[in-house]
Amino acid sequence: MLTTLDELIARQPVVPYIRNSDYAVRKPWHMPIRRLLDYLLIYVQEGSCLIHVDGVDYTFESGSFCLIQPNSVHTLQGTTNTITPYAHLDLFYNPLREASFPTGAGQLDLTAYQDLMQPVLNDLEGVHVPVRLNPTHPIGFRDTLLRMVQLWLEQETLALLEAQHLATELVLAILKQYAPPSRSSGSSPPTLNWITSFLSFHLNEPLSVEDMARRANLSPSRFSAVFKATFGVPPHQYLLQLRLRHSEELLSTTELTLADIAVYCGFADVHHFSKAFKRARGLWPGEYRQAKRVELGGEAAGK
């Protein structure tokens, strides 16, 4: 079964890493046959190139872009004087990336380096990125690539950081153009792994199910069903439990008034807070605070 881009990214995030980059200014030239461990992105700024990839010949003139993917067998040839800014780069994170390298002429057997081989985009389900790239916005793509090469050549910390950022922009443009959209519906259910941090951050606000559903890009009824299937309780009950747990922490560790705690935990007022706390915990908030002080005092005395 083919791996999808979503599944691959879950294992190996898209974290572009520029391994080597330069403006190649050359008289007619030739790079003999080899196989790549990483991606090779080329912009033919001036001149003509003949590039042979996996048995197919491609002619590139000024203003064209080429992407050669890992494991591809290829030769490169400048048939005229050329200027070809390029970058060898990883698209997907590999903790061993520092050990990888641009392969040399005649290097075809990469068996010993399989742990360094980048995933191939065209091996993924529904993805086909051509050797001859036709960016949706070619001028912007060109300018980003040229700026990336310039910054990488400076080899200064902030310049390198910006170069990697620009590489991410280029990779994103390629994926948005040639990869299928992420599966956010149908057989792949929406995920709510962000919801706890979102609710905790907005705990003091009057959140409704409609607010949460809007954040999840779901209808309120669909959101409620997905939420209960994920967390085992309806959204309003889950939110109430977060508010009560936060109130317990504030009662135990601060001298805040009950009115302040009610506000900080998102209750309508102190009366609403007290009734909700009593119903859920069996004690009024003041009783809970006093019990905690006695408990902590006993622990301190025992030390």
Image (cartoon, rainbow, N blue to C red):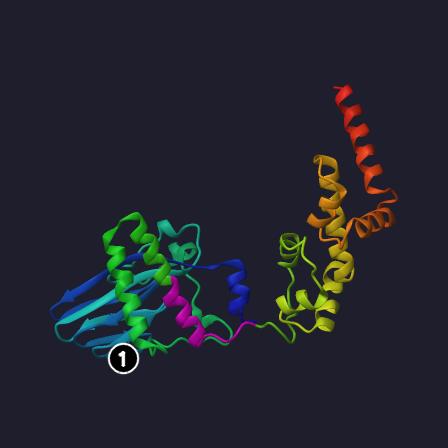
- In the rendered structure, which segment of residues is drawn in magenta? 168-182
Residue 105: percent from left, percent from top: 24, 62
The image quadrant where one finds the N terminus is bottom right
Provide the residue designation for mark 1.
58
Q: Quadrant of residue 213?
A: bottom right
Nearer the observer, 219 or 123: 219
Nearer the observer, 42 or 109: 42
Q: Is residue 296 left or right of residue 72?
A: right
* The stretch drawn in magenta includes residue 84: no
Nearer the observer, 302 or 78: 302
Task: Tell me if I can see residue 57 in this picture.
Answer: yes
User: Relative to residue 170, is residue 265 depicted above or below?
Assistant: above
The image quadrant where one finds the C terminus is top right
Residue 174: percent from left, percent from top: 40, 72
Residue type pointed to by label 1: Tyr
Q: Quadrant of residue 186?
A: bottom right
Q: Is residue 96 left or right of residue 66?
A: right
Determine the residue positioned at 76% across, 60% down: 236
